[in-house]
Image (spheres, coloured by chain):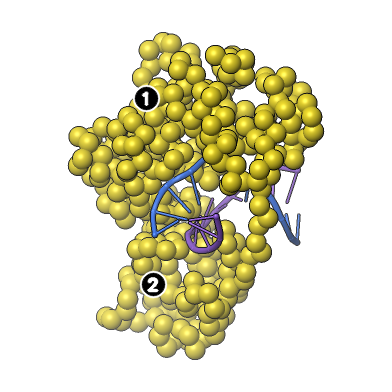
Chain colours: A yellow, B purple, C blue
Amino acid sequence: MQPITANLLDWYDSHHRILPWRISPREQKAGKAVDPYRIWLSEIMLQQTTVEAVKPYFNAFVEKWPTVKDLAAASQDAVLRAWAGLGYYSRARNLKKCADAVCADHGGSFPSDINGLKSLPGIGDYTAAAIASIAFNRPVAVVDGNVERVISRLYAIDTPLPAAKSEIRARMQALTPDERPGDFAQAMMDLGATICTPKRPACFVCPVKEGCEALQTSDPELYPVKAAKKERPIRLGAAFVAVSADNEVLLRSRTETGLLGGMAEVPTTAWTARQDGATDIASAPFAADWIAAGNITHIFTHFELRLAVFKAGNIPAMQNLDGWWVKIEKLSAEALPTIMKKVIAAAIPHAFAKRGKDV
DNA sequence: CACCCGTGGGA
DNA sequence: TTCCCAAGGGT
């Protein structure tokens, strides 16, 4: 075992983070078993998402669906409603598909090998390696954003990402031990999250600083080298909050794929098009006494959206509307992405007020 | 490989 | 304020 590996495992034993889905070295030694379902669920939630954002969702999911069979028995809509607010909603759709596949094709147990895991929806290179390593003790290289940063600094890799990926993977594989590969992977990620951070890394307390080429020869903060990013375009559109005489809001479903796929929304113009959508009352889904209710801005990963919000009240029941009516106090139970909560809050300020058990 | 796909928190 | 980014995957 290489010195870096041994030092990191020792550091992990005393400095590892306490996380709801994690079995600590002490707990492992005491015989506590790893549950592949919980590892898988946490890994999907953690994709491009912070630990603090994931914690409440993870706890709610395992409370509601304690096993993969429970999740497979749930509807996709129920899963989307529980996922609402966490973002990247294709993860939730694939989560459900994956649970179905595990139960239908694998007898309700996750496969333990990389290829079997990668064949499942929503599981790619990283997640397959993470599950194989953490849940099944397989000595495979787990490479996430933390590992890319730590390895590129340890070996002062000047090749920009993502081209450096194969070299980083080879370095990580060479460090990964046959014993405790899962703890080692988690140790690398904990190091990246708490010490070998993107900005101002705490090298003075780093357990592997002696072996860090970037620290010895230049500046760790210069790594990893990344390609320049593009500017974020702005898109415009309008959203229409229709309120019935019974204090209900008209919602509809977005298409199954693409941005916010399968989630709920109020009627809007086609702002997902590359060209800016209409922003005026003339673009309303039906005639009513629409009044301006403000503007909201929402930042997506690859564009900024500015929506003009319009509101109309006392809308009579109409039979051929594409959607459904929801009581204002029941809106929180719907699969509303954050941007739609912003839109509705602009038109109905008390819609998501934090009082009462239904809100 | 390049692009699409959310959100909220921190510097 | 503005920018960065956090345990990536699908196409």
Residue A63: horizontal and vertical position, in percent? 36, 36
Q: The N terminus of chain A lies in which quarter of the figure? A: top right
Please name the amino acid that badge 2 sits on: Leu
Q: Residue at x 32, y 29 (%)?
A: A112
Horizontal placement of A126 versus A7: left or right? left
Q: Where does residue A23 sit, x and y in percent of width and height?
A: 45, 22
Up/down of A31 relative to A292, above or below: above
Mark 1 / mark 2, whichever is N-terminal: 1
Q: Is residue A310 above or below residue A19?
A: below
Q: Nearer the viewer, residue A350 or A30?
A: A30
Q: Residue at x 55, y 23 (%)?
A: A175
Q: Which mark is residue A136?
A: 1
Q: Which residue is mark 2?
A: A250
Question: In this rendering, would A126 be left or right of A159?
Answer: left
Chain under disc 2: A
Please count the marks in the image: 2
**In the rendered view, does A173 fall on the left or right side of A97?**
right
Label 1 Cα crowd, 10 Å radius (few <14 / some 14-19 / many 20+): some
Chain letter of the residue beneath label 1 in the structure image: A
